[in-house]
Amino acid sequence: MESALEEKKKRLISSLRSTYTGQYNAVQPIPYIRDRLYCVDKVFVEGSVHFLVANEAGVRGQETSWERLESYKRIYSDRRIKSTRRILEGEPGYGKSTLTLQLAYDWCNGVQDSPFGDIEILILLRLRQLGGVKSIYRAINRFLASGSRLSDNDIEDVLKNTSSVEILLDGYDEYPDQDKVTGNDVRSIIMNDMFPNHYVTLTTRYLPKKFPKLTKRVKLTGFDDDARDEYLRKAVVGNDQKALKKIKQRLRENPILADLCQVPLFFVMFGHIAHENKEFKKFKSVTSFFKYMITCFHEHMRNKTRDDSVRQLILKYESEHDELNILAYEGLSKQDQQIVWSKDEMVKRLGQKFYDQYVGVGILVEEQVLSDNDTAYTESFTIQVRFYHKIFCEFYASYRLMLVVLEHEVSELRRFLGRMYPFDLQYLYRFACGLNPTAGAKIIQYLRSINGGDKFAILCILEQTGKVDDIKDTVRDLCSKRVDVFNGHSRLLNRSTIQLLEIAARYDKLSLFCARHQRRPSYKNWNWLEISVKKKETIAVLRQTPATPFL
């Protein structure tokens, strides 16, 4: 006769599989295309994955180098990163959440060569939904097993008596209770105080303030050419070689996008939009491409109606979104960032028609969650609303940031922007610079006044929409001292640094010299690059070391 524990385990596993199946079968590469949902396995493409090789002193403070893994599957099977605690890092849009869905697919379908194929229980929680939820068992019951009719105690009993358990905690950077020292199970799990024998992976843009030395670190570093081609074949053009060639040609025609499209989120949207739009212009910044992409979202909705009054209303709401700008800015400027709102609050702030349009185009997304006053057997639901991706929240908040910057002197900006950490909200600042050259110049001055801001200012300079003459002094000043490009920086920052040097060379009529090279070299196998400006020459000194991943 089956024990009570085994019965509870079966009910929990059945409920988990049902929840995950609904999630991984509803992947939307383009938010506004509601009639084209994909199974994650049909669109998932492996980007580059690296792991941190740490010395005997541990993970933190003594970093050595990053080495590439041949597959995401090796994250859990490579003996060099064997541990019960892992952190999966990645910049915005690099596919951390998509990878967790692929792992959920592997578990649900028993994929043989997947490290999750033979795991007994998989727990996948979105941390953005866990604000104020102290108990992990309560969280599982609310968000993953609401139909199982199990109590929190039942779930606790099952997990404590199951040896093969994987826990994925997705989106630490969006977790409302991040870095709180005590009071919730998520912190205890991260610190290895809870479930010390279960395997736990935390996905995040940036590291928690504290985590155990035994934690292994893995990083997603984006799409290469092969990954981009694979995605286009799987999800966009199929076997149509002519269409594939056309999209790749459009990518080559947009040098700014060639770098940008190493970010999977942007490339996925670029691929679908470039395939479906006959006219596709050239872009010179992330901001200009993102604005074009937003226009495509609204245009798709306009094309679905022949009612001219409705089309005019859609056009109005596309260009007039001041309240949404303020709401997004308020959320990102709080001590604990707010990235989720109740539907009632959103509708009250934005108006029903505006709200309906932005949900309709997919920029805003509704999520049904259990309310705080439900019990294990009586369910009460509420609707929460978030942006399709946090980068969309940063885009609309940048319009408000631009106005704040224009209204104040550079010396006053720290008072308003102190809580909006640039390295957490890089696109917020870059978009604001791209929207208005005057605001951009002030933001660049502000960034250069904060620790490490010189490097980040490079990205913002490249978003300038005005004439390069407006920022020549800033470019010259930044290039008048040593500029490093090395594998401790993000790919995006290193690529942008090189572009900045090319701007300096091109517009100041300087000469760019590279040791051992008479042309721009491939930086793939070079560890760092030292730049100095002397009189009318920009001298780049490259030093070669044994080939290491250039992250």
Image (cartoon, rainbow, N blue to C red):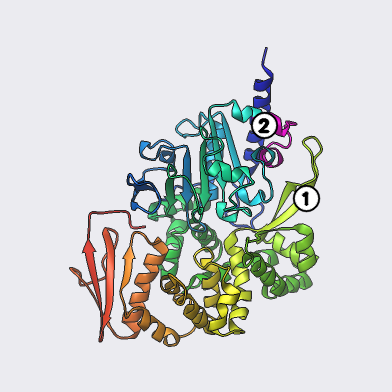
Q: Earlier in the sequence, mark 1 or mark 2?
A: 2
466 or 311: which is nearer to us? 466
Pick the quarter of the image with the N terminus.
Answer: top right
Q: Position of residue 278 (x, y in %)?
A: 54, 67
Magenta stretch bounds:
139-156
Residue lying furthest top: 1
The answer to whether residue 102 shows anywhere in this view is yes
Q: Name the residue rendered at 52%, 35% in the picture.
A: 196
Q: Position of residue 438 (x, y in %)?
A: 53, 85
75 or 200: which is nearer to us? 200
Q: Disc 1 residue type?
A: Thr
Pick the quarter of the image with the C terminus.
Answer: bottom left
Which residue is label 2 attached to? 155
Q: Name the residue rendered at 79%, 39% in the picture.
A: 375
Which residue is label 1 attached to? 382
Left/right of residue 362 with respect to residue 463 in the rendered view = right
Q: Position of residue 487 (x, y in %)?
A: 34, 59
Location of residue 260 with respect to 231 vertically, above or below: below
